Amino acid sequence: MNEIDIASFLSSLDPVSYADIIDALTRGEGNTEYFSPGSGIVYHHKDGVYYIACTGPDKASFIRHIPSRCLASVHGEWESGYMMDSLGYERVEPTYLFSYDGEPFGKSENVHPLDLSYLDFVISRYNTSSEEDIRAAMETGHLYGAFSGDSLMGFAGFHMEGSMGMLLVLPEYRRRGVGEILEKHLITTALEEGRKPFCNVFVSNSASIAMQEKLGLEKGGILSWWTWKD
């Protein structure tokens, strides 16, 4: 099966829970290192991120193709647990995948791309992404700020693997709908670029989960974990 066929197969299983893999496959953003409908998929994104999921009952064949070390988005508790307990990976709390399948929202005239002059400002306030990830978003014009006059109220952008994120609203501007304005801008941008808008949300982030649901994003039924081994 080629990448498009694999994307179609994953869409038939769960188009939301596998939205990140489907997006990468559709856009040709890497290589499928292993795939079997009865076993699973190990896909290497061009930015160094692996996508790992067991899609069938043949776990023995699947686990032989898991890299000995990498940064990976792993779909399923069994898969991430195996990588942690048997391969020595680390992981953070699980996330829900959300994806959007509606019409563009449009863009606010108060939202603009942030250039590298804002790099130190963003890094000092947002520590979930690496400097490399933030810098790449700025250099490609995919990190955006919401402004009130000349004052930056918050920012959001696309991670290197294509997901929406990096969303932070400064404390003095919270509860004013700034987060929604930024995410609507990201959703519209993704749709304009021919991509499916999707994001990962930690299961403990009830505020973000509520916002995704309010904006009409659908939540996947399979949890995923960010795992890594240096």
Image (cartoon, helix red, strand yellow):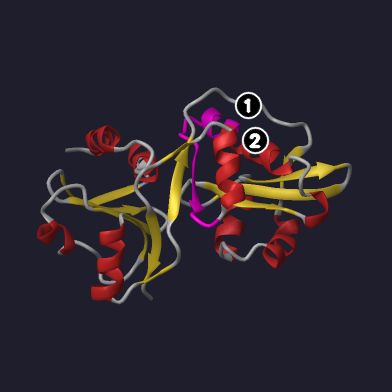
Looking at the rendered structure, the number of numbered marks drawn on it comes to 2
Image position, residue 48 (x, y; %): 39, 59
Residue nearer the viewer, 116 or 154: 154
With 143 as the anchor, is 17 left or right in this view?
left
Q: Residue at x 74, y 31 (%)?
A: 108
Q: Is residue 198 magenta?
A: yes
Q: Residue at x 74, y 42 (%)?
A: 178
Three-letter code, disc 2? His
Image position, residue 160 (x, y; %): 50, 52
Image position, residue 166 (x, y; %): 61, 53
Marks 2 and 1, how far apart at CA: 7 Å
Residue at label 1? Answer: 105
Q: Residue at x 10, y 61 (%)?
A: 60
Q: Is residue 49 magenta?
A: no
Image position, residue 204 (x, y; %): 53, 57
With 58 as the anchor, is 130 left or right in this view?
right
Among the 4 quarters of the image, the one containing residue 90: bottom left
Q: Secondary structure at mark 2?
A: helix
Q: Residue at x 34, y 67 (%)?
A: 70
Farthest residue, direction right: 149
Residue at label 2? Answer: 185
Three-letter code, disc 1? Phe
| Mark 1 neighbour density, 10 Å: few (under 14) some (14–19) many (20 or more) | some
N-term-proximal mark, 2 vs 1: 1
Among the 4 quarters of the image, the one containing residue 91: bottom left
Residue nearer the viewer, 77 or 131: 77
Residues shaded magenta: 188-204
Q: Secondary structure at mark 1?
A: loop
